[in-house]
Image (cartoon, rainbow, N blue to C red):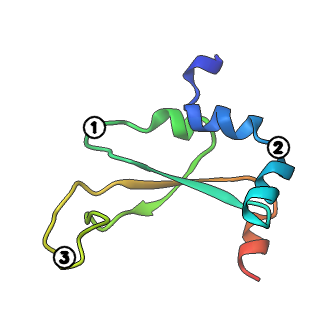
Amino acid sequence: MIGLLPATTIFLATVPTDLRKAKYGHGLELVETFVDRSRFHGGAYAASNWLEVGLTQGRSRGDREHRIQVPKKAVDVYPLSGQVRQRLCR
């Protein structure tokens, strides 16, 4: 069954909390990924308890003049603790 999970989810399960805190100076609360729904279904993320929170605007990172159109992507997040909502709303 583990072969069906997204590699990111498997990686997150193996990264100790202390390592996350040492690298960033604070614990990570959630991670995000972008899924191009025109190419991928995203079902593996849904099955791994990732939450779809919206869509991108369809712009690329280097599009400062709003001219480059790229496919809109689904934004999925994965909470790393059960209290992520309370911690982010402080």
Drawn side of residue 68 relative to residue 34, left or right? left
Residue at 58% across / 28% down in the picture?
Answer: 5
Amino acid carrying label 2: it is Pro
Upstream in the sequence, badge 1 or badge 3?
Answer: 1
Instruction: Name the residue furthest bottom.
Output: 90
Mark 1 to mark 3 CA distance (whole Å): 23 Å
Q: How packed is label 3: few (under 14 Cα within 10 Å), some, or many (20 or more)?
A: few
Circle 2 residue: 16
Amino acid carrying label 3: it is His
Can you tell which of label 1 and label 3 is closer to the viewer? 3
Q: Position of residue 41 (x, y in %)?
A: 37, 36
Upstream in the sequence, badge 3 or badge 2?
Answer: 2
| Residue placed most toward the observer, 33 or 18 | 18
Image height check: is 45 above or below 3?
A: below
Q: Position of residue 28 (x, y in %)?
A: 73, 60
| Residue placed most toward the observer, 37 or 66 | 66
Circle 1 residue: 39
Residue at 65% across / 20% down in the picture?
Answer: 2
User: What is the secondary structure assignment of the residue under circle 3?
Assistant: loop
User: What is the secondary structure assignment of the residue under circle 1?
Assistant: loop
Circle 3 residue: 66
Amino acid carrying label 1: it is Arg
Mark 1 to mark 2 CA distance (whole Å): 32 Å
| Residue 31, disc | none
> If the image is split into quadrants, where does the N terminus sit?
top right
Image height check: is 49 above or below 79?
A: above
Q: How packed is label 2: few (under 14 Cα within 10 Å), some, or many (20 or more)?
A: few
Image height check: is 28 above or below 8?
A: below
